[in-house]
Amino acid sequence: MTDVVGRQDLDAALLAQLRAQLQAELDHLLEQAGLTRDDLVDPEDPTMGHDAVTTAIETMARTGIARTSQALARLDGGTYGNCLDCGGAIPAERLEIMPATPYCVGCQQRNE
Ligand SMILES: [Zn+2]
């Protein structure tokens, strides 16, 4: 079976906490980039509705915004906590430190 199922071992309180962390992070990154949530057209491809000169900070913020908003989308979709690469479970301790991480430790290291 390769069906992706939601993580049964992550309790609702932890997921709520991680969601709040991700939303705070997203707001922070948007503020850094001078954007609002209204500028997020598509979380998969955050094409921002403004044409300011792209700075290094803004590029970094956009990468973070994409990661963070994708993590929130996975929370909504019930696939949060599963590695995007191998599909394995990302340990709760890792999610608590880096709620937006899409990969388990093994895949993260392989991708670096
Ligand atoms: Zn993995």
Image (cartoon, rainbow, N blue to C red):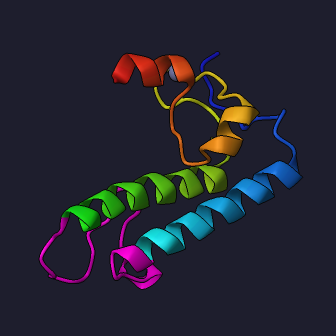
Question: On screen, 100 above or below 56?
Answer: above
Question: On screen, 42 above or below 1?
Answer: below
Q: Quadrant of the N terminus?
A: top right
Question: On screen, 45 above or below 27?
Answer: above
Residue located at (34% from left, 82% from top): 34
Q: Is residue 47 magenta?
A: yes
Left/right of residue 108 with respect to residue 62 in the rendered view: right
Q: Nearer the viewer, residue 17 or 10?
A: 17
Percent across and percent down for residue 4 are 63, 30
Q: Quadrant of the C terminus?
A: top left
- Residues in magenta? 31-55
Q: Could you tell me what secondary structure mostly forms the magenta stretch?
A: loop
Q: Is residue 46 visible?
A: yes
Percent across and percent down for residue 13 are 87, 54
Residue located at (55% from left, 48% from top): 100
Q: Is residue 90 magenta?
A: no
So how many labels did they put on this image?
0
Percent across and percent down for residue 59 are 24, 61
Left/right of residue 18 with respect to residue 26 in the rendered view: right
Left/right of residue 107 with respect to residue 53 in the rendered view: right
Picture quadrant where residue 89 is located: top right
Q: Nearer the viewer, residue 75 or 53?
A: 53
Residue located at (34% from left, 55% from top): 63
